[in-house]
Amino acid sequence: MVSRAGFASLLGASFLLLLLRGAEPLGFSHRPMTAGDELSAAPSRYLTREERWLSQRLDHFSPTDHRQFNQRYFEFLDYHDDPTGPVFLRICGESSCDGLPNDYLAVIAKKFGAAVVTPEHRYYGKSSPFDSLTTDNLRFLSSKQALFDLAVFRQYYQEKLNSQYNRSAGFDNPWFVFGVSYSGALSAWFRLKFPHLTCGSLASSGVVLAVYNFTDFDKQVGESAGPQCKAALQEITRLVDEQLRLDSHSVKALFGADSLKNDGDFLFLLADAAATTFQYGNPDALCSPLSNAKKKGESLVETYAHFVKDYFIKKLGTTVSSYDQEYLKETTPDDSSSRLWWFQVCSEVAYFQVAPKNDSVRSAQLNTRYNLDLCKNVYGEGVYPDVFMTNLYYGGTSIAASKIVFTNGSQDPWRHASKQNSSEDMPSYIIKCSNCGHGTDLRGCPQLPFRIEGDSSNCTSPEAVNTVRKQIVKHIDLWLSQCHEPTRAW
């Protein structure tokens, strides 16, 4: 997904990247945050955390490179009473995958008696082929390699089930694929590239469109904020830009971010802090204190600084260092998710969250040049996002596939990189409510912090969420019934 935080994410976490810098806690708005991003260590938030492993090829496209790495995955079989029943493949995205989250997918799996499995994305978490994440070592990190990882995993796990149940090699369970944010895009792309390996896919907030200058992201932040909150944020941006020119150290220190020497990195942190509240369904956490400050004649900048430190950094677990290009350059960082996701951004999908020319919420200093300079500074010459080729390869929002459900929250800035128009074989739903954001269909409201079983009771319109959920279940039921017989392999 990735505002930086939100990137994670769509994309992705991670909060612990937040995103995004942060999965994606990310919260980085720069990346879309994925499932692993918002999960804490509380066991109740997971169906399982028991690690399992398989060997993956490092390069699926080379006939001579036979190197392998260990990929972590998780399985949950408690609902799989019928050995011929469906297998739900949940894709982990741009963050460490530390277990199977107990969100609304668990409810769906129980309804269908499905096994649930989730492999960790290559390079993230414990599934890294290399100890040192040099730019040269990152050349095998791409969505294309990840899709082949999923295909290999799918075949590996099917064979594992056949062995477990003493079945012939030709037996094939019906499979269905799920993903949120960047992993939502992977879910759609998996159905596109490997239609014989899944009966269908759910692309929740699936960011299938690579975007070079993603100005619609900031525009949606303004729309989701509403006129008064948007105006307050724009005033804050103007004042901070001015204070940066006069005394950059003091204003950065006010936000607890004086370690960020690059002004652009600091401004990205501030932009993400605002975007994250709308992306993950917590608009009141930001707009209410700004409204109160405005009424009382208090400093908007100081009020926003308090929000950034108390909510974005402390409550969501965002690390300031994850916005620091010098930290992103480290090849053995404590938290590798930000460096990894930014590489995917800089080499494949862009999602540059730049300021629109007019009526921008974020600083005009967050432009294309800032992003390109970041890519060059962090990864060196030659790393560039060829979004034309990415969209040519996958189709963007004109993806020529079938049996994919696309869902998006009305307030989520990332929805403008998703498929929002329905077609006969690819229905698309916008979940409309004032706190419906990234992955609302599976996460509930707010999308952060984590909601057990994707509880929708705190959504401003639970009915809107539950109506779309019923449609998702309906499509899964239909497409599973239309899928190949479980005893016949395609």
Image (cartoon, helix red, strand yellow):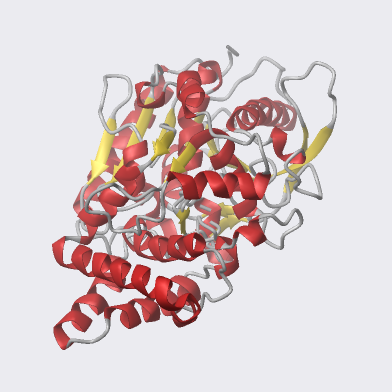
The quadrant the C terminus occupies is: top right
The residue lying at 59 percent from left, 51 percent from top is 95
x and y percentages locating residue 428 in the rendered image: 28, 32
Q: As displayed, is residue 193 above or below residue 72?
A: above
In this rendered view, identify the residue nearer to me: 223 or 169: 223
In this rendered view, identify the residue nearer to me: 294 or 375: 375
Q: Tell me if 129 is positioned left or right of 335 in this view.
A: right
Q: Tell me if 40 is positioned left or right of 288 in this view.
A: right
The residue lying at 45 percent from left, 18 percent from top is 483
Is residue 417 something that shows in the picture?
yes
Q: As displayed, is residue 172 above or below residue 429?
A: above
In this rendered view, identify the residue nearer to me: 91 or 47: 91
x and y percentages locating residue 158 in the rendered image: 66, 27
The residue lying at 27 percent from left, 22 percent from top is 423
Q: Tell me if 431 is positioned left or right of 257 in this view.
A: left
Q: As displayed, is residue 328 above or below residue 343?
A: below
x and y percentages locating residue 244 in the rendered image: 42, 72
The residue lying at 73 percent from left, 51 percent from top is 126
Residue furthest toward the front? 246
